[in-house]
Amino acid sequence: MNDESCVCDIIFSGSLGREDAILSQRTLSRCLNETILTVEADGGLRQYAQTNVSVDGRTVNYRCNNCIRALRKGGKGPVAKIKTTDGEIVGDGQPKHADGCAVIEKRVALVRAVDRECRREVRLGRKAPQAAHIDGFEKILTLERGLRGNALTELYPSWMRVRRSLYAHRMVARAGSSDGCRQSMHSGRNSFSDSTEMDESTISDDAVISKLEQTSPSHILVDVE
């Protein structure tokens, strides 16, 4: 793959502490599926949500949901789309985006990737909520030492901010729906939740808890920023 269509998907590799250690092939969506394609562009990053996968699994289509949000706010222009075949970008790796669709700061994407990985660990029952949050903070500190002039700790959410949502993820695991979550998070095929992920704003903790209380275990899906 050439430099102009370099795929730099953000996912943290726990044993490595360099900035490039988290540049891998996939990153997690808000629904904690590995369905986000990240491409370097214009001094920052562009992220594309998977919309569908071919029957043979070789071709994957992505679109920029930031473009859709920009259009909803009155912007003009196209919704940027990218296609990959066998993991390689086919065609234009730097498509035109809608007016008002800004690039994502790398440090913001790094912190988001670590935070989502922590949430997934709790969702899968692998870690307790506070332990996952502490581990995430330690990863952020490790990353920050390898960066120059890019403060990450100030962006990492505090325990009080995410406490309730992490416990909500643990409720999902304990409710017996984790098998369904695992299938969703590892399959990454034609994920309806990811392809319609229009709103990146933070979902309130109270809304998450309310949703859990009103939803049967077999249909629980917590998606918080």
Image (cartoon, grey):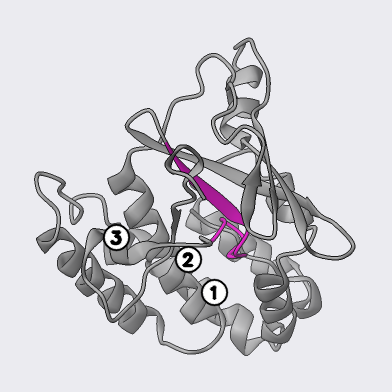
Task: Tell whether position 36 is magenta.
Answer: yes
Residue 85, position as x, y percentages in the image: 71, 54
Residue plotted at (80% across, 58% down): 190
Residue at mark 3: 20
The label on residue 169 is: 1
Q: Are marks 1 and 2 in contact (CB under 8 Å)?
A: yes
Q: Is residue 176 left or right of residue 42?
A: right
Residue 138, position as x, y percentages in the image: 20, 74
Residue plotted at (30% across, 57% down): 157
Secondary structure category for the residue under label 3: helix
Q: CA distance from mark 3 to mark 2?
A: 29 Å
Residue 18, position as x, y percentages in the image: 21, 65
Residue at mark 2: 165
**Of callouts 3 and 2, the N-terminal one:** 3
**Of callouts 1 and 3, the N-terminal one:** 3
Residue 150, position as x, y percentages in the image: 16, 46
Badge 1: residue crowd in 10 Å (few <14, some 14–19, many ≥20): many
Which residues, given as a range, are shown in magenta?
A: 28-40
Q: Is residue 90 left or right of residue 161?
A: right
Identify the main secondary structure in magenta: loop
Residue plotted at (67% across, 25% down): 79
Q: CA distance from mark 1 to mark 3?
A: 29 Å
Residue plotted at (50% across, 51% down): 204
Q: Amino acid at mark 2?
A: Ser
Task: Tell whether position 224 is magenta.
Answer: no
In this rendered view, identify the residue nearer to me: 51 or 205.
51
Badge 2: residue crowd in 10 Å (few <14, some 14–19, many ≥20): many
Q: Amino acid at mark 3?
A: Asp
Farthest-out residue, right: 55
Which is more foreground, mark 3 or mark 2?
3
Position above or below: 195 against 136: above
Position above or below: 180 against 60: below
